[in-house]
């Protein structure tokens, strides 16, 4: 697994143009790109953790993809596998692989405690490569180069690998949004990469013929077998970054954001059943409007359950934002009063920033911050869809804060914040170019 800046400009909200960050998981045995995510600059550990889970479950067909990209139309032994894993019905022609070991570099995303914990929860061994040793993960580096030559250079807004290959106005040629470019990339992986012969893939019975990644996976799965990995809503939450702390009288406080609801009442000031006495709290940096806390549930098979706890100022800031946006606000707003009033000031400043950016005002820096927030929130919606598909379960409900927001303005919208819908687009043209 590795990340790199893709050599293509994308158009974020408010006309902000910048290069997105691509993270992929490559199977060495078959050279399959098992999963790939595009994010605004600044991939987080939660993105890498979701990538692990996406490797282990079937990739769903997107609405506008042609039927030729379905697994049942490929060389993969679909009928035999579908009898073992019913989730393969309607899946795209991309392998489902459960990794034993993941090789990563020394990037802070991959050596973070959150990613290490995610690997541990899925039973995956993590092997960091030595610092500055590119050949230790040479396959993924070479794949990035192939993505640039086979895909990126045919996309509007291509930057080239260096300025000498860049045109005069590459930014002006950018036309695709992040969601649209991700749709193009995911389609190209299925029809352009997985079906393309790779000179390094050879079958022992046919050594003179190069195989495609899908053909190699079909050959190896007959030897290694296929074991479906059931992942549900709880597993999706488990992959998020974790904090351990107390439940105080005011609720849970993370990075100057207070989360509270009446569901916490029986546990305020109480110690958890664990040895350290702290409660396990998971959060999503792309959607800080709520957190999940593990609470004891003796009536459930696992003995515990996850409960969503909202931010107390959720009704004050209704536009989508990310942890990146919040950190920008924290750096610009000085504390003048108590912690409670300072959190209210931060929420007001955040709302004003998002409103200015939506109206086309503000500095370029503020527009970039707001544009990344909306792009990150939209990308998180895609991750939430994956989380539902793991176990075919309905999405987790969002609890409303306990009581009214004492700082809310009159007439404030009481609905929960929701991310904008992903742009629908039919990428049939790319299929033809593949």
Image (spheres, rainbow, N blue to C red):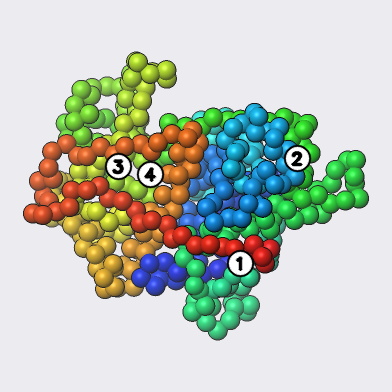
**Disc on res. 429:** 1
**Mark earlier in primary sequence (4, 1):** 4
Quarter that holds the C terminus: bottom right
**Mark earlier in primary sequence (4, 2):** 2
Which residue is rendered at x = 41% and y = 49% of the image?
381
Work out how far the residue at label 1 is from the one at label 3, CA to CA, in angstroms: 39 Å
**Mark earlier in primary sequence (4, 3):** 4
Return the residue nearer the eye: 416 or 375: 416
Foreground disc of the pair 2, 3: 2
Q: Is residue 54 above or below residue 62?
A: above
Task: Give the residue pinned by disc 3.
Answer: 290
Task: Give the residue pinned by disc 4.
Answer: 284
**Disc on res. 218:** 2
Work out how far the residue at label 1 is from the one at label 2, CA to CA, in angstroms: 28 Å
Secondary element at tag 3: strand
State the residue lying farthest toward the front.
67
Residue 45 in the figure: left or right of residue 415: right
**Mark earlier in primary sequence (1, 2):** 2
Marks 2 & 3, CB-CB < 8 Å contact: no
């Amino acid at each position: 697994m590795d990340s790199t800046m893709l050599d293509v400009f994308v158009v974020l909200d408010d006309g902000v143009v910048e290069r997105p960050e691509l993270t992929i998981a490559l199977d060495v045995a078959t050279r399959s790109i098992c999963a790939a995510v595009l994010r605004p600059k600044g991939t987080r550990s939660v993105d890498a953790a979701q990538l692990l889970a996406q490797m282990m479950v079937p990739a769903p067909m997107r609405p506008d993809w042609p039927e030729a990209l379905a697994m049942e139309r490929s060389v993969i032994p679909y009928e035999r596998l579908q009898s073992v894993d019913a989730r393969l019905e309607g899946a795209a022609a991309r392998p489902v692989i459960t990794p034993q070991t993941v090789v990563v570099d020394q990037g802070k995303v991959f050596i973070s405690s959150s990613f290490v914990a995610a690997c541990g929860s899925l039973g995956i061994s993590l092997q960091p490569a030595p610092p500055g040793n590119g050949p230790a993960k040479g396959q993924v580096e070479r794949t990035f180069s192939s993505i640039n030559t086979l895909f990126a250079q045919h996309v509007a807004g291509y930057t080239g690998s260096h300025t000498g290959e860049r045109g005069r106005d590459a930014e002006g040629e950018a036309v695709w949004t992040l969601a649209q470019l991700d749709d193009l990339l995911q389609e190209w992986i299925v029809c352009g990469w997985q079906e393309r012969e790779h000179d390094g893939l050879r079958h022992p019975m046919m050594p003179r013929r190069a195989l495609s990644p899908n053909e190699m996976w079909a050959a190896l799965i007959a030897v290694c077998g296929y074991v479906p990995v059931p992942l549900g809503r709880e597993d999706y939450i488990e992959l998020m970054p974790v904090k351990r702390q107390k439940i105080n009288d005011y609720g849970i406080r993370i990075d100057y954001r207070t989360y509270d609801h009446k569901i916490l009442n029986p546990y305020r000031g109480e110690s958890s059943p664990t040895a350290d006495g702290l409660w396990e709290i998971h959060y999503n940096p792309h959607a800080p409007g709520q957190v999940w806390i593990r609470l004891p549930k003796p009536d459930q098979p696992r003995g515990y359950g996850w409960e969503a706890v909202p931010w107390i100022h959720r009704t004050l800031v209704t536009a989508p934002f990310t942890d990146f946006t919040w950190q920008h606000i924290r750096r610009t707003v000085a504390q003048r009063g108590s912690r409670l009033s300072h959190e209210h000031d931060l929420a007001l400043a955040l709302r004003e920033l998002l409103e200015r950016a939506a109206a086309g005002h503000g500095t370029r820096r503020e527009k970039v911050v707001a544009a990344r927030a909306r792009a990150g929130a939209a990308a998180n919606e895609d991750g939430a869809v994956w989380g539902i598909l793991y176990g075919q379960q309905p999405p987790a409900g969002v609890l409303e804060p306990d009581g009214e927001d004492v700082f809310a303005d009159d007439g404030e919208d009481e609905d929960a914040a929701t991310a904008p819908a992903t742009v629908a687009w039919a990428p049939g043209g790319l299929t033809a170019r593949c």
